[in-house]
Image (cartoon, rainbow, N blue to C red):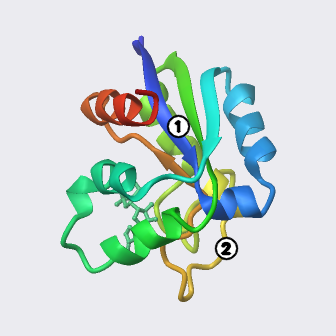
C-alpha cells in the first residue's frame, strides 16, 4: 500500500502557452490525485537556480533556466497515495519524442528537436525533492 504523499508539479511555460494547463490538471484529477494548492507565476531566476540546483554546471542548465523564465508556469501541490512516482509515471519519460503513449509527454509533447527542454511538466523525483521543492514554490 503506497503512502499518502505530496509532490510538486509544474506546468512549464510551453504547457501554459499551448493552453494545456486544463488538460494536464484534468489528468491529475482523473487519476484521483488531489490538487491542494495552485498558483501561476513567472518564476524569478533565484527560485529556478534553487529548483534546478542538481543540474547546475550541466550544458543544458542555462537554456533550461532561460526557458523556464520565458513565460508563466503553474505550480501545483498535489496529494495522493504514491503520488511522487505516480505523477512521474503519468508524465512519461523526459524526452517527449520517446515518451510512451498515454502519458502527458507522450500524448501532448512535441518532438524535442532544437527545443530540448520543452516537455510540458515537472514532477518531483523523491520524497526529499518533493519536500524541498514544495518549500521553495509554496514558501
Ligand atoms: P525530468 O524532468 O524528467 O525529471 P531531469 O533529468 O530532472 O528530467 O531534467 C530536468 C529538465 O531539464 C527536464 O525536464 C528537461 O526540461 C531538461 N533536460 C533534461 N535533460 C536534458 C538534456 O539532455 N537536454 C536539454 N534539456 C534537458
**In this view, 17 is above or below 134:** below
**In this view, 65 is above or below 128:** below
Residue lying at 50% horizontally and 52% vertically, measured from the top left: 43
Residue 110, which numbered label?
Answer: 2
Residue 113, percent from left and from top? 56, 87
Q: Compare residues 74 and 125 and report the one nearer the observer.
A: 74
**In this view, 27 is above or below 68:** above
Hey, which quadrant is residue 30 in on the image? top right
Q: Report the quarter where the N terminus lies.
A: top left
Ligand 1 within 8 Å, label 2 CB? no
Residue lying at 64% horizontally and 51% vertically, measured from the top left: 103
Residue 38, which numbered label?
Answer: none
- How far separated are the C-alphas under marks 2 and 1? 19 Å
Residue lying at 53% horizontally and 37% vertically, measured from the top left: 87
Which image quadrant shows ligand 1?
bottom left
SS class, disc 1 = helix
Hey, which quadrant is residue 127 in on the image? top left
Residue 19, percent from left and from top? 81, 56
Q: Report the quarter where the C terminus lies.
A: top left
Q: Compare residues 42 and 34 and report the one nearer the observer.
A: 42
- The residue pinned by badge 1 equals 87
Residue lying at 51% horizontally and 43% vertically, measured from the top left: 89
User: Would residue 14 appear left or right of 10 to someone viewing this image?
Assistant: right
Residue 118, percent from left and from top? 56, 69
Amino acid at each position: 500500500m503506497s503512502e499518502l504523499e505530496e509532490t510538486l508539479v509544474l506546468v512549464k511555460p510551453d504547457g501554459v502557452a499551448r493552453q494545456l494547463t486544463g488538460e494536464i490538471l484534468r489528468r491529475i484529477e482523473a487519476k484521483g490525485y488531489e490538487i491542494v494548492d495552485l498558483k501561476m507565476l513567472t518564476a524569478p531566476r533565484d527560485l529556478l537556480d534553487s529548483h534546478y540546483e542538481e543540474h547546475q554546471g550541466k550544458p543544458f542548465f542555462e537554456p533550461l533556466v532561460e526557458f523556464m523564465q520565458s513565460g508563466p508556469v503553474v505550480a501545483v501541490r498535489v496529494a495522493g497515495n504514491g503520488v511522487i512516482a505516480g505523477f512521474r509515471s503519468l508524465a512519461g519519460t523526459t524526452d517527449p519524442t520517446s515518451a510512451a503513449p498515454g502519458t502527458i509527454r507522450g500524448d501532448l509533447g512535441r518532438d524535442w528537436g532544437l527545443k530540448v527542454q520543452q516537455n510540458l511538466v515537472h514532477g518531483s523525483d523523491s520524497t526529499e525533492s518533493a519536500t524541498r521543492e514544495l518549500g521553495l514554490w509554496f514558501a
